[in-house]
Image: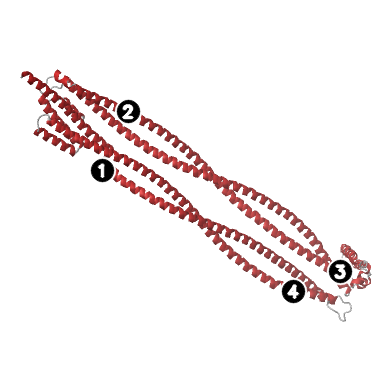
Amino acid sequence: MKAVVSLLSVSSVLAVEVNPIEKVIQMMADLESKIIGEGKDCQKTYDEFAEWCEDRSKDLGFEIKTGKAQVADLSATIQDETAKMDAASSKIDDLSADIASDEADLKAANKIREKEAADFAAEEKELTEVVDMLQRAVAILEKEMAGGASMMQLKSAKSLEEALNVMVKASAISQADSSRLTALVQTQSDDSDADAGAPAAEVYESKSGGIVDTLTGLLDKAQSQLDDATKAETSAKNKFDMLRQSLEDEIKYASKDMDDTKKSLAESGEIKAAAEGDLAVTSKALNEDVNALGDLHTDCMTKAQDFEAETTSRGEELKALAMAKKAVKESTGGATEQSYSFIQLQTSTDLKNFEVVRLVKELARKQNEPVLAQLASRMSSTIRLNHGADVFGKIKGMISDMIEKLEKEQAEAAELKQWCDKEIAESTAKKEDSTAIFEKLSTKIDSKSAASKQLKGQVATLQRELAELANAQAEMGKIRSDEKATYDKNKPEMDAGLQGVKLALKILNDYYAKADKSHSSADGAGGGIIGMLEVIESDFTKGITEMVAAEQTAAAAFEKETKENAIEKTTKTQDAKYKTKEAASLDKAIAELSTDREGVEAELEAVNEYLDSLEKKCTYKVESYEERKSRREAEVNGLKEALDILESETALVQTSVQHALRGVRKHA
């Protein structure tokens, strides 16, 4: 454009000088071209800056949106973990109190049990010594009365005390044993007197049927007391063992639960600390993004205001130049005619015509516009085929029509550009909203799917544990049934055996205690048999006691384990029920969210299709709207410049014709 304008300033071909008015007009045109060029450069720079502002604003907006979501998630995590930690701390305190209480109970039970065991040991020792002493005394008396050296003295003894003195003198028993037996008999006599007014020790032998019967009765009573003490000790020990096992189990399970709770507390603490650290970093980054977005808006608005002011100022300058140029062209025609020579007028007019054609051709070449090339060709033909002032009118009409056509096309393109920008902006915003909703729904679906999967896994584990518990309970019941059946079979046999041994002892003792046997009985061998039977009786009694204690222990353990299994079954069944219900609720929510996501996805696809159609409709294949607009402006400005040249030339021709006519009249 500048090259075309510069060619209009000098017509070096015919060495025709340009008058000062034309020179001023040319200078104004050059300045207009320069200002327009600067405006284009500024427009391009501002468009790039505005695009950067928009992109940067979108990026910061997305980062702020993401940061807010992360802050909300981290805050929720911190709140959740804090609640878990509070619950865990409360549970640890409760478990600590329970463990301390159970340990105190166990300690107290151990002390009580130690005292009971010590008391039983002392009582057992004493009763064992008494039984042993009585057994030896009875055996000695039976032997002596059966034909021993002191038989007569023993038979003549009027009381147990005299009989014992005889045995001491015969060195059959010790003085200490005699004293203990006397004290034992006296104690039994006192007890009997307190109950029913029994006779004194001197006549005791007459009541019982003899000294041997008296000592045998004492032996049976001592043995019975020993058996009762043993049973009581066994029962107390079994009860203590059960209590100790129960307390130890409670302490064990509570300790395990407390360890698990402490581990959970530590994990929650770690998660909370990590979330708090991430929250601090995320919050800082979010604040920085918010501040950056505010600064960006301020900078972009300031730049836009500066650009608008600069554009307005540049437009005012162009308007002033156009008005000045128009004033010079419209007002200086006559003065120019009178002040400067018009000898070369006709030659100058032809040059101007050809210069306008050349300008349009050059414009068509630069803009690569076939329509302008056709216009230049028609203008050239019009100049060759026509002469005079009519040429200017025809050429001006061609150029004016072309300017009107180009301006109309430019207006239509601007309207289309405005509509496209509006539709693309709205569709893009809708796409971003739909994408955000789609991603949010996808996140919720993924989260709930993971939770549902975890719950279903936990339900499967609980069901497997319940099946294992049922199998263990069934197996334990079978073992217990076998134990009970064995006990029911063996206990009667042991009872029968014990009764048989006792019967045998009674029969033998009664027989060998008789004094009027008709033959010489084997008292020594009988005493040995009686001793063996007594040992067997003791073994049977001990075996029955142990059998009963074992049965009681097994029954109590089975009952306890069964109750614990029932509690565990109920707990796990309810847990599985609740988890199954929660998983079903999650699956239902997932289905609803999936339906919502499908709707959003369909809407997003529709928006994308519409954006694709806008892309095809609003995006030029070869050049952008800005490039097309710039090209149209250059074409219109070039044609207007050519039109200005023709208008100035028309005024000049009209002035010259008028002067010529006046000259002709004068000469006439």
Amino acid at dot 4: Gly
In the displayed structure, does residue 546 sit left or right of residue 431? right
Q: Residue 60: percent from the left, percent from the top?
A: 41, 38
Quarter of the image with the N terminus in it: top left
Write the residue at 73% across / 68% down. 543
Task: Tell me the distance, in whole angstroms, between the alpha carbons under discs 2 and 1.
Answer: 32 Å
For disc 1, the neighbor class at 10 Å (few under 14, some 14 to 19, many from 20) is few
Quarter of the image with the C terminus in it: top left
Task: Tell me the distance, in whole angstroms, between the alpha carbons under discs 3 and 4.
Answer: 26 Å
Dot placed on the residue nearer the N-terminal end, 2 or 1: 2
Q: Residue 632: percent from the left, percent from the top?
A: 24, 36
Amino acid at dot 2: Glu
Secondary structure state at the residue bearing disc 4:
helix
* Label 4 vs label 2, nearer the camera: 2
Decide if residue 366 is in sight here.
Answer: no
Using the image as rendered, state which of residue 232 and residue 265 is in the foreground.
Answer: 265
Instruction: Please name the residue that numbered disc 1 is placed on.
Output: 621
Using the image as rendered, state which of residue 336 and residue 138 is in the foreground.
Answer: 336
Dot placed on the residue nearer the N-terminal end, 1 or 4: 4
Instruction: Please name the residue that numbered disc 2 is placed on.
Output: 310
Instruction: Please name the residue that numbered disc 4 is placed on.
Output: 497
Amino acid at dot 1: Lys
